[in-house]
Image: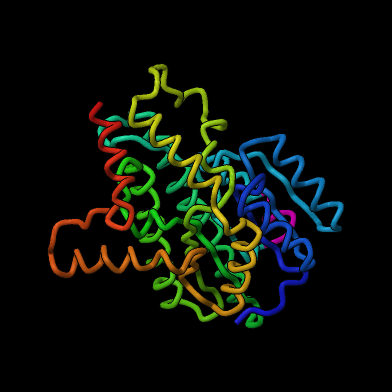
Amino acid sequence: MISDFKNKTAVLTGAGSGFGLECARIGAKLGMNLVLVDVQQDALDKTVAEMQALGAPVLAMRVDVSSADQMQALADAAFARFGAPHFVFNNAGVGAGGLIWENTVQDWEWVLGVNLMGVAHGVRLFTPMMLVAAKADPAYQGHIVNTASMAGLLNAPNMGIYNVSKHAVVSLSETLYQDLALVTDQISASVLCPFFVPTGISQSHRNRPDALKVEAKPTQSQLIGQAMSDKAVGSGRVTAAEVAQMVFNAISANQFYIYSHPKAIGSVQTRLEDVLQARNPTDPFAHKPELGVDLKKALRA
């Protein structure tokens, strides 16, 4: 149980918007040292100015989390400035939709690079530091939070590449939890599985690196996926600030699974029952058949 956050250090990727920004705001109010990371410089600068105005000691770095070298530089700089962090929020993420066979190699590299390898690098680089700190100080407590999604527990159609990346993050996080429990009682982990919450995720293509941009026009399924994502994310009623508070509550309670929309678990139960009974996957639109009808019609047009 972690109750004291004052003067502790948190590393936050994706700190320029969404959950990363809201967690930074809570951290600043709790008197934490903040290592703020984002790939979008103007958004990062804004976050830094706000946190410094709140009195937080800040180290800011523009980092592409998919890059092992940039993440290594971040880890080195964070350690040099604040020592081993107590909290790591592997939060940076991007979204991409469309029928799974229509995604290009660049799509796969971009989404898996950020969503999966970004988390893998964070875990790979910061966990060993945290373990050394825990060994040196019996009072040290640490926690790692990886941002997955309800798409890490469900497989909605027309967003396969995102589903794949987020399932991997859930798997990585569950394994991290078990592996940490083998070697220490001082550090634990959580996985954040938000449903549709108004963040910048549906516009993440704004930060796609030039090398991974696709010249071809988006396919019909990708355009539909983008429109559905914009609508679902934009109309979310649970705010990013509320989810950030849930994250801090979960750290305090050493709670592993963090859900923004507990009601969505019904769909996860249906999926797991499909698995247990070896029955074919249930129609994802069973509760809203008109959505499925419209989507099929649009894709077959």
> What is the magenta segment's predominant secondary structure?
helix
The quadrant of the rendering that contains the N terminus is bottom right
**For residue 106, above or below residue 44:** above
From the viewer's perspective, tell me whether residue 94 is left or right of residue 199: left
Q: Looking at this rendering, what residue extends furthest in the front direction?
A: 290
Queried whether the magenta region covers residue 81, the answer comes back as yes
Q: Quadrant of residue 38?
A: top right
Relative image position of residue 100 (x, y in whole percent): 28, 37
The residue shown at (33%, 63%) is 267
Near-viewer residue (288 or 116): 288
Tell how many labels. Answer: 0
From the viewer's perspective, tell me whether residue 198 is left or right of residue 103: right
Relative image position of residue 35 (x, y in whole percent): 69, 53
Near-viewer residue (125 or 35): 35
Q: How is the image coloured?
A: rainbow
The residue shown at (77%, 71%) is 6
The quadrant of the rendering that contains the C terminus is top left
Q: Which residues are magenta?
A: 77-83
Near-viewer residue (167 or 67): 167
Relative image position of residue 252 (x, y in whole percent): 61, 77
Queried whether the magenta region covers residue 134, the answer comes back as no
The residue shown at (52%, 47%) is 233
Relative image position of residue 36 (x, y in whole percent): 69, 50
**For residue 211, above or below residue 283:** above
